[in-house]
Amino acid sequence: MLVEIKKILKEVKHYKKTVAIVAVAGVVHAISFSQLAMLVKPLFDNLADASFDKVVNLIPIALGLSLAAAVGRYFHIYLMNYVAECVVQRLRQQLQQKFMKLNLSFHNSFSTGSGGLISRILNDISQIQDGLRMVADIFLHPLLFIFLLINLFRIDWKLTLATLLLVPIIATFLKSVSRSLRKYIPIGQTVLEKMTGTIKETLDGVRIIQSFNLEKVMGDRLIDESVDYLAARKKVHARTEIMGPVSEFLATGIVMCVLLYTTYEVSQGRATPGTFVGFITSLLMINQPLKKFQESYVRLQRVTVSAQRIYSIIESDQEVPESRVNKPFPAKWEKIEYKNVSFSYGKDMILKGIDLEIRKGEVIALVGASGSGKSTIVNLLERFFDATSGEILIDGQNILDINLKDLRKNIALVTQDVFLFSDTIERNIWAGDFGKDNSEVEKMARLANAHDFIMKMPEGYQSRVGDRGNLLSGGEKQRVSIARAMFKDAPILILDEATSALDTASEIEVQKGLDHLMKGRTALVIAHRLSTIQKADKIVVLKDGQIIEVGTHQDLLKNESEYFRFHSLQHS
C-alpha cells in the first residue's frame, strides 16, 4: 500500500508550491475553527450571567475567526482539487505514451483487450482523482482533530483522557474494514474492466452483431458481468457504510457520559454550564474530522488498488527498447538480411530459423497459409516486437543498433485493415510525415488515384473521414493510406494484403496507386491472391514458421510443390 501511495505523492511533488499553499490554508482553517469552539464556553457563561458588554466584545472575534476559517477552507479544497486534476492528467498522458510504446505482443495478449486499457485510463484514473481530492481531508482533519483535542484538554483533561480510551477500538475497527476493502475493491475494478471491454466490443462490432442477431447474446454478457460487479460493489458499500453508524453510536454514548459527568461537576461547584456546552461543542466538532478521516482512509484503499493497476501498465517492460547504440539508418544500404531469425509468442514458435536476403529495389512476396509467419516477418523488420533469437541486418548493421524512430521513418506500411484518424483527408495523408510541408498532399493523392473521389466530397481535402475512416468506402480508405505512404517517401515498403478485402473494381483503382507507390522502392508484399504477385522478383513460401520455397513465379510453378498447390487451388 505504501509503495503505491509514494508513487502518487511523487506525482504531487510536481506541484509542491501549490500544495504548500494548500497546507498553509489548512492550518489557518484548523486553528480558526478550533478557536471558534473555545469561544462557546465564555459566550455561554456570559450569557448566563447576562453580561451584555462581554458578549458584544466576543462577537467580532467570533466573526473574524469564522471568516478566516471560511477563507482557509476555500483555498485548501479548491487548490487541492486543481492539483488532483493536474496529477491525473499527467497519469493519463503517461498511460497514453506507454500504450503507444508497448509492443504488439502486449496488446495482442492483454486479457480484456483495448476495452480493458480504456478502463484503466478512465475508471482507475477517476478513482485516483477522487482519492487525491480527499488528500486535503487527510491533511486537514487530523490537524483539526489535534487542535480540538487541545481544546478538550484545556476544558477538562480528566474527561478527555477517559474519552480517548475509545480511540484504540475505533482504530482496530478501521483496520479490519480496510483489510476487507482491499480484498473486494480489486474484484470490482477487474469486472468493471471486463464491462468496459464488452461495451467497446458492442460498439466496434455493431454491424456483425445486428447481422447475426447477437443483440441478446451481447446484452446477456453485460448483464452477467453487471451481476458480478454489483455483488463486489455491494460488499464494498456494506463495509464502507458501516463506519458511519458505528461512529454515530459511539458519539451518542460519549455525549451521554459527558452529560452525566458534567452535571455532577456543576452540582459540586467545580464546573459551570459553559464548561459542559464548550466541551460538548468541541466533542461534536471533533466528530467531523474523525468521520472525514474515516472516509478518506476508505478512499485511500481504492486509490491504492487503482494505482497498482495503473502502474502495472506504466512500469511494464513489454515495450520495444530504444537502441543503446542509436546509429542512424544506413544512407546507401544495399540489402536486408534475416539470419537464423526465430520468434515465439508465449510457448508457440511462430518463426523457426528464418534466413532471407532482400536486395535493394527488389519486390519480395511472402506467401503461405494463415499463421505461417508472413506478418511476423514484416513486423520484426519494423520492430513492433523483437526476434527471440537470430538477427536482422541492414548492410551488416543490426536493426537493434539503429535509432528506432529513424528505422521506422524509412519504412512505409499499407495494411488490409486501413486505419485512418478521425480528421480531414488532408491531415490523414500528411500524417505520413508531419515534419514535411503539406504542399505535396494533392500530388500524392493524384499518384494514389485518390484525387478524383476526394474532389467529389463536399469539402474536398478538408472533408472529415469519420471514426477509423468509416465515412469512406474500403477502396477510398485504401487509396488515402497509399497516398499517406507515398507522402512518407520511405525507401522500404510493406504491403500487408493491401487489396485482399476489396472488390474487383476497387482493387483495380487501388492497384494503380500501388504501382506508383512501389516504383523505386524495396517492397515486401504479403498476398493471398497470387495473381497480384506474379511479377515479384522473389516469392518466399512459408509453412509452419519456416521458409520451404524461394523463387520466381515461373520457377516455383515448375517445382510443383507448395506454391504450385496454392496456385492450383486458386485457379481450379
Image (cartoon, helix red, strand yellow):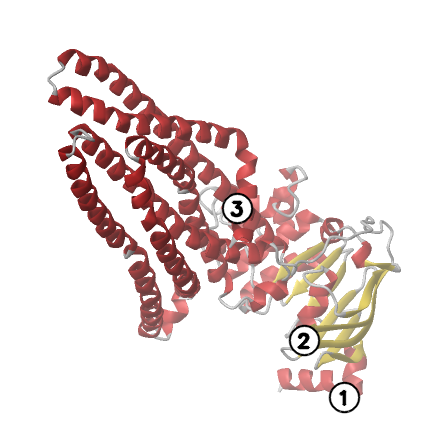
Q: Is residue 27 above or below residue 527?
A: above
Q: Mark 2 or 3, which is nearer the eye?
A: 3
Callout 2–callout 3 Cβ contact below 8 Å: no
Question: Rounded to the nearest whole Å, what is the CA distance between mark 2 and mark 3?
Answer: 55 Å
Badge 2 amino acid: Leu
Question: Rounded to the nearest whole Å, what is the CA distance between mark 1 and mark 2?
Answer: 15 Å
Q: Is residue 451 above or below residue 205?
A: above
Q: Mark 3 or 1, which is nearer the eye?
A: 3
Percent coordinates x, y for residue 102 in the rendering: 62, 58
Q: Nearer the N terminus, badge 2 or badge 3?
A: 3
Q: Nearer the N terminus, badge 3 or badge 1?
A: 3
Q: In screen coordinates, is 557 left or right of 270? A: right
Residue 449 visible? The answer is: no
Callout 3–callout 1 Cβ contact below 8 Å: no
Quadrant of the drawing holding the C terminus: bottom right
Give the residue number, with chain letter if any, for mark 2: 530
Percent coordinates x, y for residue 476 in the rendering: 53, 56
Q: Quadrant of residue 154?
A: top left
Q: Quadrant of residue 193?
A: bottom left
Badge 3 amino acid: Ile
Badge 1 amino acid: Glu
Instruction: Please rate how many residues cluster around mark 2, counting C-alpha atoms within 10 Å: few if below 14, some from 14 to 19, many from 20.
Output: some
Q: Which mark is residue 560?
A: 1
Residue 55 visible? The answer is: yes
